[in-house]
Amino acid sequence: MAAELINRYFWLMDVIYRSEGISREDINRKWSYSCLNERGEDELPERTFHRYRKAVERLFDVNIICVAGKYKIENIKMMTSEKQWLLDSFAINNISLSHRKMRSRISVEDVPSSRQFLIPIINAMEDGRKIEITYQSFYALAATTFIVEPWGLKMHHQRWYMVGYSPAIDKTLVYGLDRIKEFSLTDEQFEVPEDFDCDKWFGDMFGVNSYAPEFNHEPQDIEIHVGCGQIDYILSKPLHRSQRLVGEDSTGYVLSMHLVPSYDFIMELMKYGAEIEVVKPIELRKIFIQNIEEMNKKYGILS
């Protein structure tokens, strides 16, 4: 599937997504002046529209329904943050292309991992085709080449990751797109398991990492105390979908969550410094105490 076609799918999804309901006439009008309409068509042909609509439903896992002559997303609240990011990125890029004067007035964070392999992987997912990748993690001394079934995609901290099943080792793992050295599309077909859901697969994780040997890689009931200076930031962008506000005192608030306390999660909490205190579990609290003591030794040498 060509990148141009993917862009058209994104365009249609964006047009419908940002409306409370839009008619075919209005879709045609928007298409007539879209920068993607290179042929200068006055309308999006009926058969083409429905072909794109079905592709959008598969790509974004949504239902597009027609009510009183207007098309809208039926299950819009189920949209994941990654898919919303994709749409927002497309919209910004579309504005930049359509309104050149705006280019110097819009600045977005760079996502290097999306440049080379994101669209080809989306294509492979859409077509149900296995891919061959040459991959080298940041901890590996050499790269290896193998076949993967691309099941899903997730973005975390401005990096894209692929959930992929590797037949050679019979495991489903997470692969960072910025660690892929080479990529090729195979002719082998695959089907994603019917019960696979990317959000649920990552449900107990902070981001994409579930490595936590101190906790047998299992989710824990966690409570943290957040100072008044940072609570609004964390409430407006929760650390995890299980996050709940469960208490408060004169110095801050208590949040609870249920997840695997991986290294990435620990580093995320530590960036807030003294504004966050781990209340429980005690094992996690001890890890923070140990980290703080080691930091104190390093900085104590300089004092």
Image (cartoon, rainbow, N blue to C red):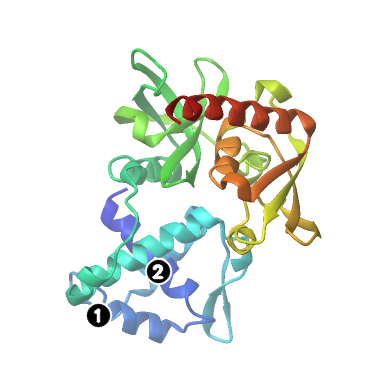
Q: Camera-side residue: 265 or 276? A: 276
Q: Is residue 89 above or below residue 279?
A: below
Q: Of label 1 and label 2, which has the lower sequence position? A: 2
Residue 288 point in image, percent of width and height: 65, 32
- Identified by mark 1, the residue type is Tyr
Query: Would you identify the image quadrant in which residue 273 lies?
Result: top right
Give the number of marks: 2
Residue 33's tag is: 1
The residue at the point 54 percent across, 75 percent down is 72
The residue at the point 33 percent across, 81 percent down is 30
Whether residue 123 is visible here, answered yes or no, is: yes
- Residue indicated by mark 2: 12
Query: Would you identify the image quadrant in which residue 66 lies?
Result: bottom right
What secondary structure is marked by label 2? helix
Q: Residues within 10 Å of mark 1 (few under 14, many from 20)?
A: some
Q: Are marks 1 and 2 in contact (CB under 8 Å)?
A: no
Q: Residues within 10 Å of mark 2 (few under 14, many from 20)?
A: some
Q: CA distance from mark 1 to mark 2?
A: 13 Å
Residue 74 point in image, percent of width and height: 61, 70
For the view shown, which residue lies furthest in the top direction? 141
217 left or right, relative to 150: right
- Identified by mark 2, the residue type is Leu
The residue at the point 80 percent across, 60 percent down is 249
Residue 75 point in image, percent of width and height: 63, 66
Q: Is residue 154 above or below residue 88?
A: above
54 left or right, relative to 145: right
